[in-house]
């Protein structure tokens, strides 16, 4: 259980950190423009989600919330030793994985270059699922 909790805690912290790292970049006319997950919220109407040209975009607010929830679930597992919070951590990790996958699809289809932040978002979501399975067993 402890190993799973540590994995969830680290994944939540990495997910939080990935929000402030570059998610996408685009080079036009010799100038490279890079956006962090946090900056993506400035380009949508509701700060969380947008669909542009049929392509979904989950902003850094979503990754921040998902990371915070994973950290909270890890702490609640430690405090209560309840498997319910491990199941919740799995649900939040799967939601984060879906959001990161949707963003990856959108960024690739719009011909953006991927930044380290989006890769960490995806990796921490996948590893968070594994950590939650370990914490439940």
Image (cartoon, grey):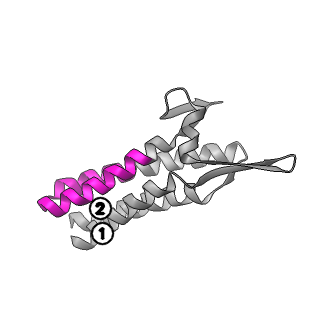
User: Residue 74 in the image: x percent, y percent?
Assistant: 26, 60
Farthest bottom residue in view: 3
Q: Quadrant of the C terminus?
A: bottom left
Q: Toward the viewer: 130 or 116?
A: 116
Q: How many marks?
A: 2
Q: Is residue 20 left or right of residue 114?
A: left
Q: Give whichever of discs 2 and 1 has the lower sequence position.
A: 1
Residue placed at 43% from the left, 54% from the top? 16
**Which residue is located at x 32 percent, y 63 percent?**
9
In this view, the mark in front (2 or 1): 1
Query: At x 18% / y 53%, what residue is drawn?
Result: 84
- Which segment did they paint magenta? 64-93
Give the numbered dot on residue 132. Answer: 2
Q: Callout 1: helix, strand or loop?
A: helix
Q: Position of residue 29 (x, y in %)?
A: 87, 46
Examine the rendered structure and indicate whether residue 5 appears above or below residue 33.
Answer: below
Is residue 80 located in the magenta-colored stretch of the structure?
yes
Magenta run includes residue 4 = no
**Numbered circle sitting on residue 6:** 1
Determine the image quadrant of residue 4: bottom left
Q: Is residue 82 left or right of residue 37?
A: left
Label 2 crowding class (10 Å Cα cut-off): few <14, some 14-19, many 20+? many
Instruction: Give the alpha-carbon distance from disc 2 to disc 1, as whole Å.
Output: 10 Å
SS for tag 2?
helix
- Tell me where residue 113 appears, x and y as whole percent: 70, 53
In the picture, the quarter occupied by the N terminus is bottom left
């Amino acid at each position: 259980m402890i190993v799973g909790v540590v994995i969830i805690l680290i994944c939540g912290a990495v997910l939080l950190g990935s929000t402030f790292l570059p998610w996408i970049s685009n080079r036009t006319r010799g100038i490279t423009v890079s956006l962090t997950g946090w900056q993506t919220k400035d380009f949508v109407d509701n700060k969380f989600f947008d669909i542009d040209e049929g392509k979904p975009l989950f902003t850094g607010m979503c990754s921040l919330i998902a990371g915070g929830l994973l950290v909270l679930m890890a702490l609640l597992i430690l405090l209560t030793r309840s498997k319910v919070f491990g199941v919740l951590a799995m649900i939040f990790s799967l939601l984060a994985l879906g959001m990161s996958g949707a963003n990856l699809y959108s960024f690739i289809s719009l011909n953006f270059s991927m930044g380290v932040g989006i890769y960490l978002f995806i990796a921490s979501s996948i590893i968070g699922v594994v950590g939650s399975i370990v914490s439940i067993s």
